[in-house]
Image (cartoon, rainbow, N blue to C red):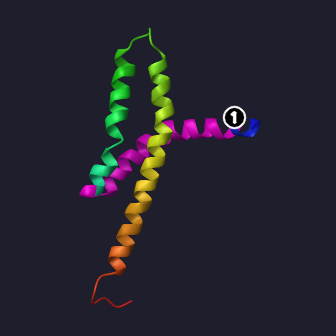
Amino acid sequence: MDFVLGRVIPFAVYGGMFGYPVLQYLAIYWTRGRWQVYASLPLVPMAVLLAVAGFSGSGADLWSLLLVLTAPLALVYLAVLLTLHRRARVTAASARPGERR
């Protein structure tokens, strides 16, 4: 249990804080159509949390903590979305009629 609290949770938090914005940009850049809409979905709650954390001032510091703890969830969502997008592209490419392998 100490390993989880001491190693895995901080790794997930820092990975979410620094990896989420990069993966969010790449997900919107790499996808098109409805996949791009799905990739943009985490921007809504993250933008709301960022706005509340920014406008809350120094009296309510816990909003920034909520933003930091939500970023890993958005990172996992985007990773799953990009994996599904990749599988859908590969399946669609292999199902095209008239192509030789």
Query: Is 1 displayed left or right of 8 in the figure?
Result: right
**Towards the viewer: 94 or 1:** 1
Quarter assignment of residue 2: top right
User: Looking at the image, is 55 positioned above or below residue 81?
Assistant: above
Query: Is 39 displayed left or right of 13 in the figure?
Result: left
User: Looking at the image, is 62 positioned above or below residue 99?
Assistant: above
Q: Which residues are magenta?
A: 5-34
Residue farthest to the top, as pictured? 59
**Towards the viewer: 14 or 45:** 45
User: If the image is split into quadrants, where does the C terminus sit?
Assistant: bottom left
Query: Is 61 displayed left or right of 9 in the figure?
Result: left
Q: Is residue 16 magenta?
A: yes
User: If the image is split into quadrants, where does the N terminus sit?
Assistant: top right
User: Looking at the image, is 78 positioned above or below residue 100?
Assistant: above
Residue 50: horizontal and vertical position, in percent? 37, 27
Q: Residue at x 37, y 62 (%)?
A: 85
Residue 80: horizontal and vertical position, in percent? 45, 55
What kind of secondary structure does the magenta stretch mostly adopt? helix
User: Looking at the image, is 90 positioned above or below residue 84?
Assistant: below
Q: Residue at x 28, y 53 (%)?
A: 36
Residue 91: horizontal and vertical position, in percent? 37, 74
Which residue is labeled 1 in the image? Answer: 5
Report if residue 40 is visible in the image: yes
Q: Residue at x 31, y 45 (%)?
A: 40
Residue 49: horizontal and vertical position, in percent? 38, 27
Report if residue 18 is visible in the image: no
Label 1 packing within 10 angstroms: few (<14), some (14-19), many (20+): few
Quarter assignment of residue 11: top right
Residue farthest to the right, as pictured? 2
Q: Residue at x 37, y 51 (%)?
A: 26
Say what secondary structure mark 1 lies in: helix
